[in-house]
Image (cartoon, rainbow, N blue to C red):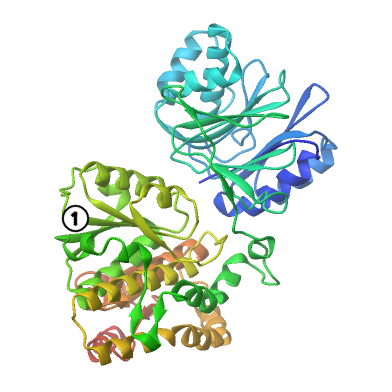
Amino acid sequence: MCGIVGYIGHREAYPIILKGLQRLEYRGYDSAGVALYHDGKINVSKTKGKVDDLRKKVESSGNMEGHLGLGHTRWATHGVPNDTNSHPHYSNSGDLVIIHNGIIENYESIKKALIARGYVFHTDTDTEVLVNLIEEVRDKEEVKLGKAVQIALNQVVGAYAIAVFDKNKPDEIVVAKLGSPLAIGIGENEYFVASDASPFIEYTNNAVYLEDEEMAIIRLGKEIKLRKIKDDAIAYPNILELQLNLEEIEKGGYEHFMLKEIYEQPRAILDTYRGRLLADKGLVKMAGIDQNLEKFLNANRIIIVACGTSWHAGLVAEYIFEDLARIPVEVEYASEFRYRNPVITENDVLIAISQSGETADTLAAIKLAKEKGAFVFGVCNVVGSSIARETHAGAYTHAGPEIGVASTKAFTTQITVLTLLALKLASEKGIFSASQFHEILAELENIPGKVEEALKSNNLVAHIADIYKDSTNCLYLGRGYNFPVALEGALKLKEISYIHAEGYPAAEMKHGPIALIDEQMPVVVIATKKGHYEKVVSNIQEINS
């Protein structure tokens, strides 16, 4: 998951690109680079490490001038993290420069063919192959850069968000998208390119989000030209007004974005159910459900597809839907679902969950389900994202921008939306009495305050962390609703601390994991007062013994 930034206009490009890369560093952080065009020359600086390492390198070189530039943060896929493999990449002639988020799956065969035709490669990346393929098409077909990009992309297999420019045409950037997000910010005689809108929100709130298999030719002094990569059909840009502000994407006094977002959870949960949860009236109002109620009520089953943290939210939702709404649910990893031959019918409802709304595997699962005739409902956070556009209906979580790579408020707001959805269906099916329903809604209204109270335990958490910080393994246990929460806890420890951790159903501990438990193995048990509490206590006693 790399981050890309580009600028063309009347401002100095470097400060914009550097700040943009810092905001996108959550997307990938083993290396970074920038290419700036100035006075007929392209100056490229790139380095292994963080964006701040890049800043020091660029500023020590003194090559910071230029009104056209591309920047990149990398999470290595092809080639080890080092200065050479970092983006941007040149073509053999040195004319073309490219940045790329994604994977070109057939790069090896293309590389062999290009080597046979005299091309030389200096990196281990698939991206260098793509930029040289574009150059070969441009020279062989004698076409402009935009057409060369289009022809080349029809020869590759994989996913990409790219931005490329030719130093002989410094008034133009060509961008294209398939399976990776790409936004174009539109200013006054200036354009911005980025993986999301955060790098350019302080300069413009007008943006175009490219659809899959679309490309755009961005030229100073002219309107953006959008085309379909496959058939050259003209596409018309849908310019959106961003609902994002600068304050939301700054740290706001917190040391880390993740910490800020943990403390934003009470507000985020409240914003997610605001206007939907009407406890005093005993109502749940959700437009995406109200308009498609029969689809849910007549569904044979609900299939939930997601990845990572969103998959864990889907597992919690499985318990909620089956418990409250009495509808059978299956939860699938989107990355597995799309590559097997799943049984999907017109009577199924597929719920796709994604914080960004751009998760490639989840998007592919959506397309597969739509082809089979299923009704598809999206749960995502980013307004105007690909999943929001591809699904038949959906609900936004209203969590606000999530910059931290390890989801926190995304998880809790996804569960909030899914709980409201299950309660809405339970109400329509008459499963609860009016008094029971009122009681549940009233308890839901109390959740933000309870989260606020839980966050006051920060000092205790810090004390516990200090005790276990040198551990190399950890086991998380939970039962019922808390089993998926145990999985999520283990994932967080892995992502943030690089400590191996595993989540397990507490009752299954004796079927394997107990063999690993000794005095050096921390075990985190989620033991809430409700939900098999006595049985979980028995599991704890077994661990102690």
Residue found 67% across the figure and 66% down from its top: 251
Which quadrant of the structure image shows residue 528?
bottom left
Q: The disc labelled 1 sits on which kind of residue? A: Asp
In this rendering, position of residue 113 left or right of residue 301 = right
Which quadrant of the structure image shows residue 433?
bottom left
Residue 468: image location, x then y, percent: 49, 77
Quadrant assignment for the C terminus: bottom left
Q: Which residue is mark 1?
A: 348
In this rendering, position of residue 392 left or right of residue 425 = right
Question: Is 509 in front, or is 320?
Answer: 320
Residue at the limit of the structure toward the right, as seen here: 62
Residue 77: image location, x then y, percent: 48, 39
Which quadrant of the structure image shows residue 23?
bottom right
The reply to whether residue 343 is visible in this rendering is yes
In this rendering, position of residue 318 left or right of residue 109 = left
Residue found 58% across the figure and 16% down from its top: 135
Q: Secondary structure at mark 1?
A: strand
